């Protein structure tokens, strides 16, 4: 999920302004916005269980949860962009793959083990499951050690794919064309899987996220041009994203309520919304960076992996301490308060813990960096 910190060299800022920005980059702001989305998405999903059926509070959580469902494609897009940029500048594949093992594969293995032990300690799975090879095949092969760990597996697969996309980046394909190409390839993958492959968990593979990866590779090849492109095209990108969300959201709400929806239309609308949304978040990251606003967002971005890995355990622990059954029959206020508490804990405690781990010089052990 983490990626090299790059400041576009063409940004000719005044010396004082450069010094003010030096500690943070647009990449940090992107990651900060994306990790905020992750926390709000997971917290709203957990808080749904505290809201009454049919209440306006539940509707609010449902809408928030479905709108904020773009972080995984976004992080994959960002990694593809900055890693492609890095490979184009320094095509050292030995270094590239070694860093992906240290920063990607090791945290995936370690945190899968930690979350399996955590879930067994909570009583969600029997301890002897940890001794069954077939269970490990499922957990590691599909990212099923916990509900959020599949992203690390998909990211690992994207790292293998990115060098194969370098010809696309070197060809400097236009960003708009890459968006269309990525969505077309993604639709082809959907029908190939439906017709021939029939993967058990397609959303736990990089095949389900090729659109943002292709788009990210194209942006990586044109990184120095992105700001100008965004200024010219942002109105059209925002309109496309809003239209895709308008198509996707009703189906997403029906899906969340357990109603039957068309798998094809649901998947297509998801890709049509989340892929250009990655461009929107990058544009927003550049805007925040350029204006020097919301520095705390960029600081959160520097700890995005730590927050991502730690916060689900906090949500699960909080729900055990205060289960939804205790709030049955109450109005929406407790659910909203629980939601705010979840968000606060999910942001504050991982930051504190990651700082403590860094002070103990154990960040490399727990997070690979």
Image (cartoon, rainbow, N blue to C red):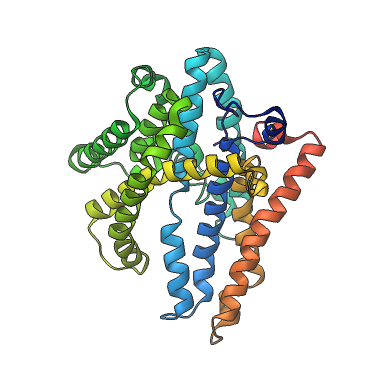
Q: Is residue 91 above or below residue 277?
A: above
Viewer can see residue 73: no
**Residue 68 percent across, percent down from the top left:** 46, 56
Residue 156: horizontal and vertical position, in percent? 48, 31
Whole-percent x and y of residue 63?
A: 42, 66
The residue located at (41%, 81%) in the rendering is: 54
Say if 301 sits above or below 65 in the image.
above
Depth order, front residue of 279/200: 279
Where is residue 20? Give x, y as percent. 71, 36
Count the labels in the image.
0
Q: Residue at x 59, y 26 (%)?
A: 12
Q: Nearer the viewer, residue 5 or 124?
A: 5
Q: Is residue 58 left or right of residue 105?
A: left
Q: Which image quarter is the N terminus in?
A: top right
- In this orientation, does residue 184 appear? yes
Q: Quadrant of residue 172?
A: top left
At a point 42% along the width and 19% down the height, the residue shown is 163
């Amino acid at each position: 999920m983490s990626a090299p910190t790059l400041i576009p060299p063409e940004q000719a800022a005044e010396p004082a302004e450069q010094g003010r920005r030096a500690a943070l980059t647009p990449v940090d702001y992107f990651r900060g916005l994306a990790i905020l989305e992750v926390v709000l998405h997971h917290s709203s999903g957990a808080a749904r269980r505290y809201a009454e059926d049919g209440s306006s509070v539940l509707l609010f959580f449902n809408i928030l949860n479905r709108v904020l469902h773009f972080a995984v494609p976004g992080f994959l897009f960002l990694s593809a962009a900055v890693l492609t940029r890095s490979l184009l500048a320094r095509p050292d594949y030995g270094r590239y793959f070694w860093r992906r093992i240290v920063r990607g594969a090791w945290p995936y293995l370690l945190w899968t083990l930690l979350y399996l032990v955590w879930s067994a300690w909570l009583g969600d799975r029997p301890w002897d499951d940890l001794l069954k090879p077939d269970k490990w095949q499922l957990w590691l092969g599909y990212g099923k050690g916990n509900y959020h760990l599949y992203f690390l597996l998909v990211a690992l697969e994207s790292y293998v794919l990115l060098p194969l996309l370098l010809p696309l980046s070197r060809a400097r394909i236009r960003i708009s064309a890459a968006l269309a190409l990525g969505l077309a390839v993604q639709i082809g993958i959907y029908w190939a899987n439906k017709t021939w492959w029939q993967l058990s968990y397609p959303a736990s593979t990089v095949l389900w996220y090729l659109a943002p990866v292709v788009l990210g590779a194209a942006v990586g090849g044109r990184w120095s041009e992105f700001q100008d492109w965004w200024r010219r095209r942002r109105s059209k990108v925002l309109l496309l994203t809003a239209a895709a969300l308008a198509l996707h959201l009703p189906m997403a709400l029906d899906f969340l309520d357990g109603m039957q929806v068309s798998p094809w239309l649901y998947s297509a609308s998801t890709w049509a919304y989340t892929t250009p949304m990655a461009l929107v978040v990058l544009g927003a990251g550049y805007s925040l960076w350029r204006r020097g606003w919301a520095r705390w967002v960029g600081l959160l971005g520097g700890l995005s992996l730590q927050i991502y890995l730690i916060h689900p355990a906090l949500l699960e622990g909080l729900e055990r301490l205060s289960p939804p059954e205790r709030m049955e029959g109450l109005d929406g206020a407790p659910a909203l308060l629980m939601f705010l508490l979840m968000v606060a804990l999910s942001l504050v405690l991982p930051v504190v813990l990651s700082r403590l781990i860094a002070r103990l010089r154990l960040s490399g052990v727990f997070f690979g960096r």
